[in-house]
Amino acid sequence: MVSQLLPATRAPDPIAPLATRTHCPYCAFQCGMVVTAVGGGPKLEVQADPAFPVNRGQMCIKGFTAADLIDHPARLTTPRLRTRDGRLAPATWDAALDFVAERLTRLRDAHGPAALAAFGSGALTNEKAYLLGKFVRVALGSPNIDYNGRYCMASAAAGQNQAFGIDRGLPFPVADIARTKALLLWGANCAETMPPLMQWIGEQQSGGKLMVVDPRRTETARLADLHLQLTPGSDLALANGLLHLAIDERLCDLDYIARRTQGFEEVRRAVMEVHPAHVERLTGVSIDDQLRTVRWLAAEESSMLLSGRGPEQQSKGVDTVLAFTNLMLALGKVGKPASGYGCLTGQGNGQGGREHGQKADQLPGYRLIDNPEDRAAMARLWGIDPAALPGKGKSAYELLDALGPEGGIRALLVFGSNVAVASPNARHIERKLASLDLLVVCDAFENETSATAHAVLPILQWAEEEGTMTNLEGRVILRQPACAAPAGAKSDLEILCALAERLGHGERFRFSSPEAVFDELRRATAGARADYSGISYEKIRRAQGVFWPCPTVDPPGNHPGTPRLFVDRFAFPDGRARFHVVRHRPAAELPDAAYPLYFTTGRYKEHYNSGAQTRQVAALVEAKPAPRVQVHPRLASTLGVAPGGALVVESRRGSVTFEVEVSPDIRADTLFAPFHWGGKSSANVLTNPALDPSSRMPEFKVCAVRARAASTPVDGAVP
């Protein structure tokens, strides 16, 4: 599994005395940036770091405007408690923490520890993700913890674990993208969601072929040599169809299959049952385009399939990812130079966030909560009886759906996630949040989730604290403070430790710094699949990031990290990858006579996820002040709407009125809207919470809707 090393990277160039090298607070690319405190702060200037080998001096508009959040007038710097008249009133930290601890204790005594829950985030550092998981399981004694990464990378993670024995978004550095000769981007609009990545794709295009699978002709699809504009929800059928054609055309690498895999014959029989003409009818992708795609992937010495949220955010997302791994294994590409399958992880620490214990089924280092040996290892480190360690809790949507007296969860702590906007069936989740006996939101700004909170605790932001993140390629990097923190805000780590002290578990939560938490995390992961034990803050600074796994070796700290996985073996005892039989099945909700259109969601380049941060930045709001629904000209004519008009879009869960954007880039049977807004502009009011049976990923990308012209214009997005 371990083998090839990257060429040595040059040391960072010297920078001005008041400048700090750190990383962007947004996506999983984790662009290096140089931050300079103007006049000592808090005003900051941000530049892209030309020496960081991932973004190489490029950055998107979100990164360049990230400093606007630090001294923003709406920034929270004082704890707030809900008063009897319904207001959020300022409070001291001692009063706020005492209130939260007393409520947690009272609810646990009355209803048991499972009545308490926490919801984390892919925006949290590794240290915070680790400590939050430990806090819930040790200080609260509850099984109920999950995070918003369940809405993002969960299906790709589950698929890679089943196929390869380990999950790392990209099992190779992003630089390998530029070296591959055939690149298939599946449901990933990198030009808008991860613009600095496009420099690597641009280099790839100079000598290779680019294919894009997407129901929309996105900015990324415009660059492609071939755009496969499939029917929403038919990704699994198309992936199986490509493998059928690879077998039929004798393009499979039979020697590789025999040496490095198992289970191919069962998959071969299954995919050959479905004729390419049937796949063409299901997907809308012609047999000719299917053939062209698989021939390009097979013919080149190096080829790569990278998926985004499009195929993953479905109720069959895991099976679709397994169809991708089946295809690339059959072609003999996984583990070869500049080749294989990877997931373009979305959130800043979506990778590290799922490795270190804030998923319902996982303990630090990708240890499993149901595995007796893993439980014993964590119990020893934490100084508790393994029997006292709670079992598996509820996944993200299921946890939120269980809020309130009927579901049994009475208290929820939310760290870095705006669940009222980010969750499917959003109106239902708003009602669930309002039914809680205790809702605590830890954030730098008020948002839709804090609207019904009993306590809002102000936290430090990215430029004010230290901690590690793990980017989409498995590179562990270090955020460093660039300015002083405001007097009234605290780190999430401080909050967790202070609450643990009040709950009687202070001795297990006394850390002098984020680095001290990381040192415990290193011990927690030693010998596990995601082994960080050989990584240190100093090593990260020297190497501009360290790829995991990086175990402790003799002499200590000497392991260089693992940029590329699967070169020699896969992460199963026999070293072989696994094929899996997966068959197409329809989306949980298809268009019918009552709801005749598909609806799908995505992102604008100016905004990020639930918009809790980017909707605070004036330049980003000015560029994209509100969501617009994309409508094909033919459908717009049928519905009687024009550009700038208003369209009511209704699903079985609710309705939203959007401003209209008429575009030939969308399929005529499909509507698209971004999900960055809440309230009456929330696209997730419409989306379906149907869950993948394995990953528990909701089906954000496919639901059935109907639409009609609105009688009144859109009156603006909710800020």
Image (tube, rainbow, N blue to C red):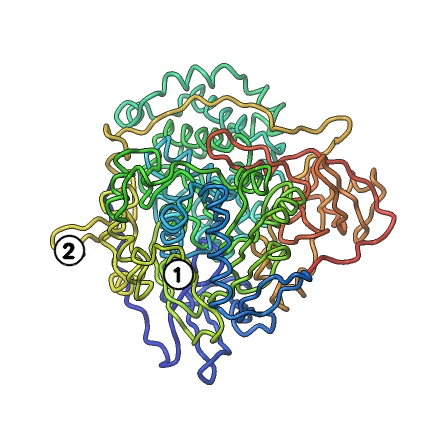
Q: Residue 654 at x, y = what percent?
A: 73, 40
Q: Residue 465 at x, y = what percent?
A: 40, 67
- Residue 49 appears in which quarter of the rendering? bottom left
Q: Give the structural element (helix, strand or loop) at label 1.
A: helix
Image quarter in which the C terminus is found? bottom right
Instruction: Please give the residue where the numbered disc 1 appears in the rendered image.
Output: 493
Three-letter code for the amino acid on which mark 2 is drawn: Pro
Residue 404 appears in the picture as rendered: yes
- Residue 52 appears in which quarter of the rendering? bottom left
Image quarter in which the N terminus is found? top left
Of 483 and 375, the residue lying toward us? 375
**Taking 114 as reference, is 590 above or below it?**
above
Q: Which mark is residue 556?
A: 2
Q: Nearer the viewer, mark 1 or mark 2?
A: 1
- Mark 1 in CB contact with mark 2 (< 8 angstroms): no
Three-letter code for the amino acid on which mark 1 is drawn: Leu
Q: Residue 395 at x, y = what percent?
A: 49, 38
The local crowd at label 2, few if under 14, some if 14 to 19, many if 20 or more residues have their Cα within 10 Å, is: few
Q: Give the structural element (helix, strand or loop) at label 2.
A: loop
Residue 192 appears in the picture as rendered: no
The local crowd at label 1, few if under 14, some if 14 to 19, many if 20 or more residues have their Cα within 10 Å, is: many
* Structural distance between the alpha carbons of marks 1 and 2: 28 Å
